[in-house]
Image (cartoon, rainbow, N blue to C red):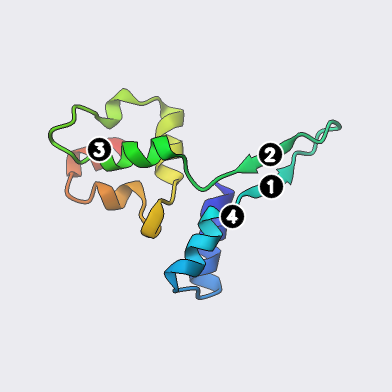
Amino acid sequence: MRKQQLYSSAVNVDGITDPVSRYNVLFTPDFNTQGSKKRKLVLDQSFTYLHWKMAEALPEKDIKFEIKQLSRDEIKLLALNIFPQGKTVVHYLFNSIEQLKILY
């Protein structure tokens, strides 16, 4: 969620349009500590390789993979990811209306 906000701010507020600069926002690990006494270190990445491949596979007719197979938490993570070239799962599904209806 923080990566989504950082990316949106970089594009919409800071006006970053250069793809390389946007990639720097996406691929920079986001380190923070949670507010607990133990100060557990948290590392947020913009996406995982698995989610990227899942998003690419969703519109493929040959691959028998559908959003219905995912849990609600996985769908949420998939929907919030920003993949290379600034794409989201919606970009991958723009020709698959039925899959988009299930997603949202």
Instruction: Tell me the number on the disc at residue 31.
Output: 1
The disc, 2 or 3, on the residue closer to the chain's N-terminal end is: 2
Q: Circle 4: is it few (<14), some (14-19), or many (20+) Cα within 10 Å?
A: few
**Residue 101 visible in the picture:** no
Q: Earlier in the sequence, mark 3 or mark 4?
A: 4
Residue 83 picture location, percent across and down = 40, 51
**Residue 37 x %, y %:** 86, 32
The amino acid beneath tag 3 is: Leu
Amino acid tagged 4? Thr
Q: Residue at x 33, y 36 (%)?
A: 54
- In the image shown, does 76 or 40 lie closer to the viewer? 40
Q: Which residue is mark 4?
A: 28
Q: Are marks 1 and 2 in contact (CB under 8 Å)?
A: yes
Cα–Cα gap, marks 2 and 4: 14 Å
Alpha carbon separation for disc pair 1 and 3: 31 Å
Contact (Cβ within 8 Å) of mark 1 with mark 3? no
Residue 6 horizontal side relative to residue 58, left or right: right
The answer, for residue 18, to whether it is visible in the render is yes
Read off the residue under disc 3: 58
Q: Is residue 12 above or below residue 56?
A: below
